[in-house]
Image: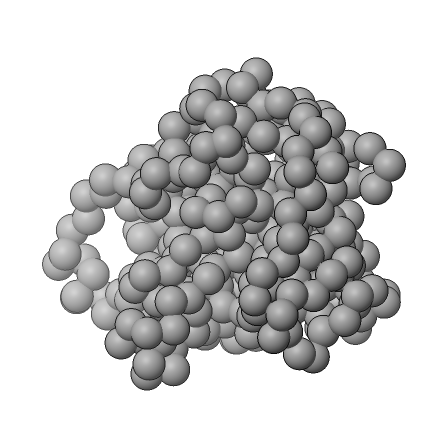
Amino acid sequence: MKAIIFDRHGDSDVLGYRDVERPSPGAGEVLVAVRAVSVNHGPDVETRQRGFSMGAVEMPHIGGVDPAGEIAEVGPGVTGWRPGDRVAVYPVIACGVCEFCRDGFPENYCSNSRLYGVQTQGGRAQFAVAPASQLVPLPDNVSYEAAAALGVAYTTTWHGMNQRARLTANDTLLVMGAGGGCGVAAVQLGKLVGARVLAVTGSEWKQQRVRELGADEVFSYRDPDWAGKVRAATGGRGVTAAFDNAGSETLPSSVDCLARAGRLFCSGGTTGFEVMLDVRQLYRNLISLYFYVQGSKADMAELVGFVADGKLDPVVDSRYPLRAAAEADDKLSSQDHFGRIVLTVEGSE
């Protein structure tokens, strides 16, 4: 079979489109004929560049954390699944034995979790082995591309919005980085909940795209007074919730935009990880900060249901054939995209 593989860290030119042996599913595993897999900054690009701060990457390595396709084979002991079933792979593999797993917390709380496609071989291939426990069933009206788009960005965003910040239709939500994968998801999901959405992004064309998604007001982070304009748009009160994965460059200003008893949810730091905040501002204004990692399998299944019901249409910026994975990675790194980038896989590649 064909796969995208690298045997050392580096730029996108370390990626090779090679013939490799087709894997066989072991006990409790299935073999998925991959049809689509999305491109992600941390799990894919950063892992290829230098690792993802999750331990050593097995070399040679096949990335791809969120493939979708149909089951080609089932391994020993697998029940409830059969060849031909349409599935997506949920990427967080919980250990099942830590205190959080024993107490019934969602998979993303596991203290010993592994990320599919980072600490295992992944889905940038015609076929990929995955634990049957990671599978999410796909209705016929959910495309493989849409399912792959949900795996990381939408699932992570929805967990923070729904399970951590508990966003409702009564909220005004600030979305930082609204033109990126998680930002686009936040705009769409915020509107799905019924919240008023104030979005911040960069270039004018991205601002227009965010408006088309339904954002109520859009601002440019290149405007030095964007935070003041956000507060002005709320009559000076501030937003009740904020989503900021940009990190050090914007998070303090996002906190400044919060109303009394406001809450901020965050699962990343694309511009840096060290942030200075005034603790007095936080406790005197009853501010809640919610930090988290990934989302749960139940979150992903719920999103699949939204797509099946016509409530959500994941935004796919561009599609590349598997053999063009390096070009897709570079497109993501350029930030000249809006929404998700997806690799499509054909059996005859």
Of residues 112 and 176, the one drawn nearer to the viewer in this rendering: 112
* Residue under the point 74% across and 61% down: 73
Of residues 138 and 282, the one drawn nearer to the viewer in this rendering: 138
* Residue at the limit of the structure toward the left, as seen here: 280
Q: Is residue 54 visible to the viewer in this orientation of the structure?
A: yes
Q: Is residue 15 above or below residue 309?
A: above
* Residue under the point 45% across and 53% down: 115
Q: Residue 120 appears at what percent x and percent y?
A: 48, 48
Q: Is residue 165 visible to the viewer in this orientation of the structure?
A: no
Would residue 60 appear left or right of 301 to someone viewing this image?
left
Of residues 109 and 268, the one drawn nearer to the viewer in this rendering: 109
* Residue under the point 55% across and 53% down: 152
* Residue under the point 49% across and 68% down: 296
* Residue at the limit of the structure toward the bottom, as seen here: 103
Q: Residue 148 appears at what percent x and percent y?
A: 68, 52
Q: Is residue 223 above or below residue 189?
A: above
Would residue 219 appear left or right of 246 to someone viewing this image?
right
Occupied quadrant, residue 258 = bottom left
Would residue 143 appear left or right of 162 to someone viewing this image?
right
Q: Residue 43 appears at what percent x and percent y?
A: 48, 42
Quadrant that contains the C terminus? top right
Quadrant that contains the N terminus? top right
Q: Is residue 27 above or below residue 63?
A: below
Would residue 254 appear left or right of 78 to someone viewing this image?
left
* Residue at the limit of the structure toward the top, as seen here: 13
Q: Residue 99 appears at what percent x and percent y?
A: 27, 76
